[in-house]
Image (cartoon, grey):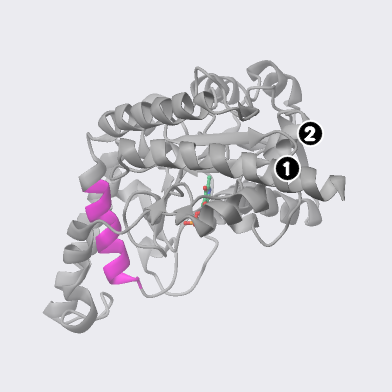
């Protein structure tokens, strides 16, 4: 099997697994209990919090653990909007956000907020000028993702943040995909809130974090006990959080290495694909993208058919966003980027990881050449009958 779907999830790093193991059957205590064994667990969770904070250059107290990127996105968007509602009810996001963000904004619309969904250009980028023009006196919050999960496009976050700051707009960014290969300093970026997910960085599924700068207007979204300093109720998923901390520590300082590795794989993959007779386009922003996500549109093809043929050859990839695979709607991200319709339906996302080898991506590309030829032949024969 060749796994080329790292933007959907990554395998657990064996070192992460080792760090998690004691917290299932041996050190299973509830960190809120008073005995010393439980307090030791609390210390371990706080160590994990420090590891995640270090990864993004934040203060430890600014990291709130959650169940994943989806929860952190919901908590950020809804929690900030409700905290600011007396100042204004207009919010800004983009058309190509992950569903966790888009659905949170749709919910807010149902609660009387107004939302501007910014378009993107043919490079899938939000224009700072469009952002500035969308701002109204009652705009209180904006959420624009740092890098897109389907195309890997990196947004001009620093520029957007400086515009937001000039208008006292609280700014959140979803950095779930970006963190893999972009070193992030929340201080340098100037964002007020930022989302991370553990399972995209070789940590366990079911853990994530919301960075919330001190003094940012925000109300907790999951209420209950006073875990996470009263900012997110619920007994901590101890092993997952410790694993997340370990994954963050392993990623620390490695992002540019991963980026270089991703770029080499990307080039080898595209070079091999170009050798075939296949008509394809790469759905990307050439100068500002995550190297390891390669979204390829095959002309007049059905992405599902290509994926199925790949699967039969032991190659696992994805149709844009993994959580969308139950629907066969064309990708809203590619549509927003005005990709020619002839290529949208046949778009497949390949995403490589730190353990992916060059021979593997070359193999995928050469198999793709054969698959597309085969599908075309079958279509021609069917058309001839
Ligand atoms: N945001 C982005 C950009 C993502 O790619 C994903 C997952 O694919 C999420 C949020 C959701 O994260 P999780 O799977 O941890 O809920």
Please, is residue 373 above or below residue 309 in the view? above
Q: Residue at x 62, y 40 (%)?
A: 372
Q: Residue at x 68, y 38 (%)?
A: 333
Can residue 275 be seen?
A: yes
Direction from residue 378 to residue 36 in the image, left or right: left
Q: Residue at x 78, y 47 (%)?
A: 381
Per the picture, the main secondary structure of the magenta-coloured stretch is: helix
| Residue to which mark 2 is pinned | 341
Distance from the alpha carbon under mark 2 to that under mark 1:
7 Å
Rendering quarter of residue 269: top left
Would you say the beta carbon of the disc 2 residue lies within 8 angstroms of ligand 1? no
Label 1: state its secondary structure.
loop
The spot of residue 54 in percent (x, y) is 25, 41
Mark 1 surroundings: few (<14), some (14-19) or many (≥20) residues within 10 A: many
The spot of residue 213 in percent (x, y) is 42, 41
Mark 2 surroundings: few (<14), some (14-19) or many (≥20) residues within 10 A: some
Direction from residue 147 to residue 20 in the image, left or right: left
| Residue to which mark 1 is pinned | 345
Please, is residue 347 above or below residue 239 in the view? above
Rendering quarter of residue 326: bottom right
Q: Are marks 2 and 1 in contact (CB under 8 Å)?
A: yes
The spot of residue 37 in percent (x, y) is 13, 79
Q: Which residues are magenta?
A: 236-249
Asked whether residue 167 is drawn in magenta, I would say: no
Asked whether residue 239 is drawn in magenta, I would say: yes
- Total labels: the figure holds 2
């Amino acid at each position: 099997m060749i796994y080329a779907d790292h933007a959907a999830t990554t395998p657990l790093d064996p070192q992460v697994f080792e760090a998690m193991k004691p917290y299932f059957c041996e050190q299973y205590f509830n960190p809120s209990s008073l005995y010393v064994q439980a307090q030791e667990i609390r210390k371990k969770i706080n160590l994990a919090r420090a590891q995640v904070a270090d990864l993004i250059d934040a203060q430890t107290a600014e990291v709130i653990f959650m169940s994943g990127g989806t929860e952190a996105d919901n908590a950020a968007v809804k929690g900030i909007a409700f905290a600011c509602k007396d100042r204004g009810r207009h919010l800004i996001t983009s058309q190509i956000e992950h569903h966790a963000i888009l659905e949170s904004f749709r919910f807010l619309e149902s609660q009387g907020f107004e939302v501007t969904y910014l378009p993107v250009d043919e490079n899938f980028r939000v224009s700072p000028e469009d952002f500035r023009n969308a701002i109204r006196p009652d705009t209180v919050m904006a959420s624009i993702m740092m890098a897109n999960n389907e195309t890997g496009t990196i947004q001009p976050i620093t520029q957007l943040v400086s515009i937001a700051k000039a208008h006292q707009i609280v700014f959140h960014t979803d950095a779930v995909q970006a963190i893999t290969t972009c070193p992030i300093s929340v201080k340098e970026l100037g964002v007020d809130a930022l989302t991370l997910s553990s399972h995209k960085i070789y940590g366990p599924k079911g853990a994530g974090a919301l960075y919330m700068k001190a003094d940012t207007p925000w109300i907790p979204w999951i209420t209950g006990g006073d875990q996470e300093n009263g900012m997110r109720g619920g007994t901590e998923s101890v092993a997952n959080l410790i694993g997340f901390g370990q994954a963050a520590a392993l990623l620390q300082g490695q992002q540019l290495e991963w980026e270089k590795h991703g770029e080499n794989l990307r080039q080898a993959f595209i070079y091999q694909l170009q050798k075939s007779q296949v008509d394809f386009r790469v759905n990307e922003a050439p100068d500002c993208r995550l190297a390891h996500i390669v979204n390829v549109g095959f002309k007049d093809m059905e992405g599902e058919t290509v994926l199925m043929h790949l699967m039969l050859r032991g190659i696992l990839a994805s149709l844009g966003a993994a959580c969308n695979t139950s629907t066969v709607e064309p990708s809203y991200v590619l549509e927003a980027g005005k990709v020619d319709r002839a290529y949208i339906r046949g778009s497949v996302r390949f995403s490589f990881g730190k353990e992916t080898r060059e021979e593997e991506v070359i193999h995928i590309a050469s198999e793709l050449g054969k698959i597309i030829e085969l599908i075309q032949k079958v279509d021609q024969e069917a058309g001839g009958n």
